[in-house]
Every structure is written in structure tokens, then in C-alpha cells.
Amino acid sequence: MSSRNPRTSGQLRAGLLVWAVLLGTAGSHIIQGQGQAPPAQGGAQAPGRGGRAGGPGGPGRGGPPPTGRPGARFDPTGYWVTLITEDWRHRMFTPPKGDYEGIPLSPAGRALADTWDPAKDESAGEQCRAYGAVGVTRLPTRLHITWQDDTTLKIESDAGTQTRLVSFGPPQGQGGDWQGVSVGTWEYPASLFPGRGRGGPPPGGSLKVVTTRMKPGYIRKNGVPYGANAVLTEYFDRFDVPNSDSLLIVKQELVDPDNLNTPYWASPNFKRQNDAAGWNPTPCSAR
């Protein structure tokens, strides 16, 4: 993650394409697991064409585009293994107390981080603080993504044995737990000629997920905090690169005025596996 302002949408999409190809050929920091993606499980698929250039597209001639599984812009399902391509020492190991490099902590956030004590977290039953929606995808983990039903996407992680439900439509649940309340929408590329489509939105697009009402947790395992008022916005894009690997590129923005001076950006990315090889649910660890 970094606190730098993200690039414009066009530059971002071009950069993601280059990055996806580079990730597909890199292997030195990949947790074992790779494979070719199977066909989509319901919904339309536009493999290899992600991006969010211009936000939601307009409705086609038949009215608003479908949402949830029927309106899927790509197939996000399957087993995915994390690619540790940035912040390696902060993600593969628990950083020492006081190592907040790259995080725009406010004075209040820094003061709270300086109180980190993993033994206290363990005794309070709070050892999952680093496994909330903000932190778990930054850990060495695998994801298992499935459709629970046509309007709910389920994202499981083996690290910490966590489950997040993404609702397409009204928010579901009260929140207040580690994964909070997540609402998903499909975003479409901007059309060069609005109103001249042939019955539907243009191909490609991103999955946008906004998560709120999270239980306070850690951005990093060494106590770097986010609070109950934090808002996590994520964009998921799938790229099928030339060597037949499929990548899930995730862009995250964390806004937390209680603990951060500015928004905090990160990009935890994943590579698709053929099967459940290596899937190993483990309990949370505070250390």
C-alpha cells in the first residue's frame, strides 16, 4: 500500500494490463499454486478485459444492465493464491512494533499503534484483528470465491478462516464483525459513443466492493489500526495473460479519518489455481 494519489482511470487500466503480464511471468514470490481458469459459473464473462475507465455504463436498449451473477462482467470464482509482489517484509513476517513505513498514520493512529501488545489481544480473544476485510488479503493466503446465490458473492480466506459476503443490492447484516458489510456493483468501461450501443453495455468492466461497519482491526499485524468508521473501497479486475494464467488484480482504498491523515492505497493480487491444492484453513494468530 501507499498513500500516493492513484493515476487517472485510463493510465490505471493501461498500467494494470502491463502489470498483469509481468505478474504472470514472475514466480519468485508466488505462494505455490497456478492454473488455467475454467468457464464462468453463470453470468457473462469478458476474460482479460478489466478496468474501470469512466465508472458505470449506461443501460442498454432493454433497460438497466443486470446485477449480481446474471450481470457478471467476468468470472471471479475459483481458488486464488496470493502473489507477494509488494511490501514483502511487511506481509510475509510480522513487522516489529513501531514499523509504520508507508502508512499515513495520524497522530492519534500512531499513538494507538504504539500500544500494540499481541499478548493482550490473545487474552481478550482479539487475535483476528489483522484478519478483517482490510488486512486479510494482505496476508499470505488463498481465497475461495463462489456465488452463494445470484445476488451474493462469498469470499473465503484460509488465513484466519474468514468469510466475507458481498451483496449486490441493499446491504445485508448489521456489521460490527471483522468482515463488516460489503456491497458490490459491476462497473462498465466508458463508451466512446454514448447512446450508440447495440443493446447492452460495452464489454469489460470491474467489480467494485465497498465495505463499511467493520470491527476495528489492523492494517498490518503489528498493530497499525483502522477504526469502526473506516471505509474500504476495492476494484477487482481479472486478466487472462498469454501464458494461460489468470490473475485477479485488486486495487484498494482505505479511508479512515480517525487514524489516517490521507487515504491509504494497496494492491493485493492473486493467481488462479486449477483446484483446491494448498487450501489450508488456519486459525488467526496475533503474532
Image: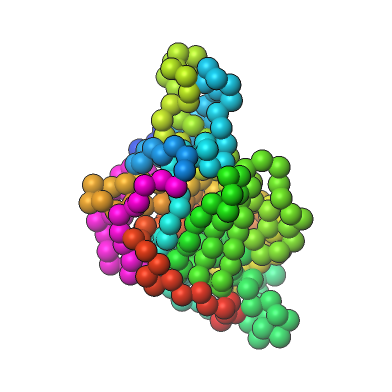
- Vertical order, 51 against 194 (above or below): below
The answer to if 35 sits in the magenta stretch is yes
Q: Nearer the viewer, residue 105 or 254?
A: 254
**Residue 157 in magenta stretch:** no
Q: Give residue 160's position: percent from left, percent from top.
A: 56, 73
The residue depicted at 58 percent of the width and 77 percent of the height is 284
Looking at the picture, how far across and down is residue 109, in whole percent? 68, 64
| 196 lies above or below 53 | above
Looking at the image, residue 102 lies above or below residue 151: below
Is there any visible trace of residue 169 in the rendered image? Answer: yes
Above/below status of 45 relative to 98: above
**Point 70% across, 70% down: residue:** 112
Instruction: Provide residue 229's location: percent of width, then percent of height.
Output: 73, 54
Name the residue: 68% across, 53% down. 181
Rendering coords of residue 9 (x, y %): 45, 35
The front one of 39 and 223 is 39
| Residue numbers of the magenta segment | 15-41
- Quarter of the image for residue 11 reads top left
Q: Which residue is found at the position 43% from the left and 42% from the top? A: 74
- Residue furthest to the right in view is 174
